[in-house]
Image: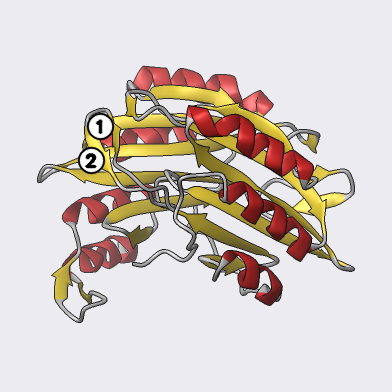
């Protein structure tokens, strides 16, 4: 009963925008919050729910990856009209969970435009199902929640991990990180130009992962890992992949994440380890071959 009162209060709360104006919380976000049992986050006018796979201990070699390093499921919600939403996201799964979740998504009528890897050589093997759905906020959220429930994904609100690493050297190369948690930090690079998905115009935003995202994790002893996804046009794929490879960042996947998308764009994933600043210079070189903004921090 207490949690129901909490979410009722969330729907009525007024917040201040960056310009100091009083704005009402979108009731669609309150409805989604009730379904997922967490308040989520609002950026760029969109709403996002994060569900880290904190139940998993994923290794590449002897390195253990933290959940913010490519191991967090999410759904981003775009407001459509006055009551509907377009949902876009990905579900992080052990390979033995894929069949059950995929079957539930089909049963719920949720589109699954992609199923693929992001990493190579990880244990246990991790796969990513990308999802899209459109309709009333509560209905869409309920369908997605049912699919998540077919996996061992923790459905509780994720705990905030205090930043435990210094990112000054990487910030000097890539710009200020957009967020930091534990030993990880993430950098976002929006893409210039208009993007539409299913006929809906969307921003290049980390909330929807329609922006390039770069993630680092520090292991200690001067070693770090770097991975993520660069959001590229067909004409940029080869140059970006070649540049990453020249800097010791090995491409692990090239694929699409969504359907009915204009223009046609791809996501290019990579992984590498070494000195964090050296890895950052390799990423910066690859970004220099792309039509992306050279700033990482997003604004609320």
Question: Can residue 84 be seen in this snapshot?
Answer: yes
Residue at 70% x, 59% y is 281
Q: Is residue 110 above or below residue 251?
A: above
Quarter of the picture containing the C terminus is bottom left
Question: Can residue 68 be seen in this snapshot?
Answer: no
Q: Secondary structure at mark 1?
A: strand
Residue at 34% x, 28% y is 261
- Percent position (x, y) of residue 201? 24, 39
Tag on residue 104? Answer: none
Q: Is residue 144 left or right of residue 294?
A: left
Residue placed under numbered mark 2 in the picture: 85
Q: Is residue 192 above or below residue 176?
A: above
> Which of 58 and 33 lies nearest the eye of the viewer?
58
Measured Cα–Cα span from mark 2 to mark 1: 6 Å
User: Colour scheme used in the picture?
Assistant: secondary structure
Q: Is residue 26 left or right of residue 218?
A: left
Q: In the image as oriented, which residue stretches furthest toward the left?
A: 82
The 10 Å Cα crowd at callout 2, few under 14, some 14 to 19, many 20 or more, is: many
Mark count:
2
Quarter residue 97 falls in: top right
Residue at 67% x, 24% y is 96
Tag on residue 134? Answer: 1
Q: Is residue 210 above or below residue 44?
A: above
Q: Is residue 171 left or right of residue 120?
A: left
> Which of 109 and 270 lies nearest the eye of the viewer?
270
- Percent position (x, y) of residue 9? 22, 69
Tag 2 near tag 1, CB within 8 Å: yes
- Percent position (x, y) of residue 216? 68, 58
Mark before the other along the chain sequence, 2 or 1:
2
Quarter of the picture containing the N terminus is bottom left
């Amino acid at each position: 009963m207490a949690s129901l009162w909490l979410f009722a209060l969330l729907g009525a709360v007024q917040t201040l925008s960056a310009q100091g104006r009083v704005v009402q919380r979108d009731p669609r976000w309150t409805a989604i919050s009730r379904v997922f049992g967490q308040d989520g986050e609002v950026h760029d006018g969109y709403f996002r729910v994060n569900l880290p796979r904190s139940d998993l201990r994923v290794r590449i070699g002897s390195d253990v990856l933290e959940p913010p390093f490519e191991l967090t499921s999410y759904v981003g919600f775009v407001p459509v009209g006055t009551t509907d939403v377009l949902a876009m996201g990905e579900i992080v799964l052990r390979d033995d969970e894929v069949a059950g979740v995929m079957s539930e998504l089909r049963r719920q009528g949720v589109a699954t435009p992609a199923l693929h890897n992001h990493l190579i050589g990880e244990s246990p093997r991790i796969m990513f199902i990308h999802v899209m759905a459109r309709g009333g906020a509560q209905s869409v959220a309920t369908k997605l929640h049912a699919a998540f429930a077919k996996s061992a994904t923790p459905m509780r609100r994720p705990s905030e991990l205090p930043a435990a690493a210094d990112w000054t050297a990487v910030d000097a190369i890539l710009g200020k990180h957009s967020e930091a948690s534990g030993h990880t930090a993430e950098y976002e690079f929006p893409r210039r130009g208009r993007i539409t998905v299913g006929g809906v115009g969307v921003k290049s935003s980390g909330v929807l992962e329609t922006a390039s995202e770069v993630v680092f994790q520090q292991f200690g002893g001067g070693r770090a890992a770097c991975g993520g996804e660069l959001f590229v046009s067909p004409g940029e794929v080869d140059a970006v992949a070649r540049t990453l490879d020249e800097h010791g960042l090995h491409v692990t996947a090239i694929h699409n994440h969504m359907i009915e998308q204009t223009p046609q764009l791809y996501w290019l994933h990579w992984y590498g380890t070494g000195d964090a600043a050296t890895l950052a210079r390799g990423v910066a070189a690859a970004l220099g071959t792309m039509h992306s903004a050279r700033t990482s921090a997003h604004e609320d």
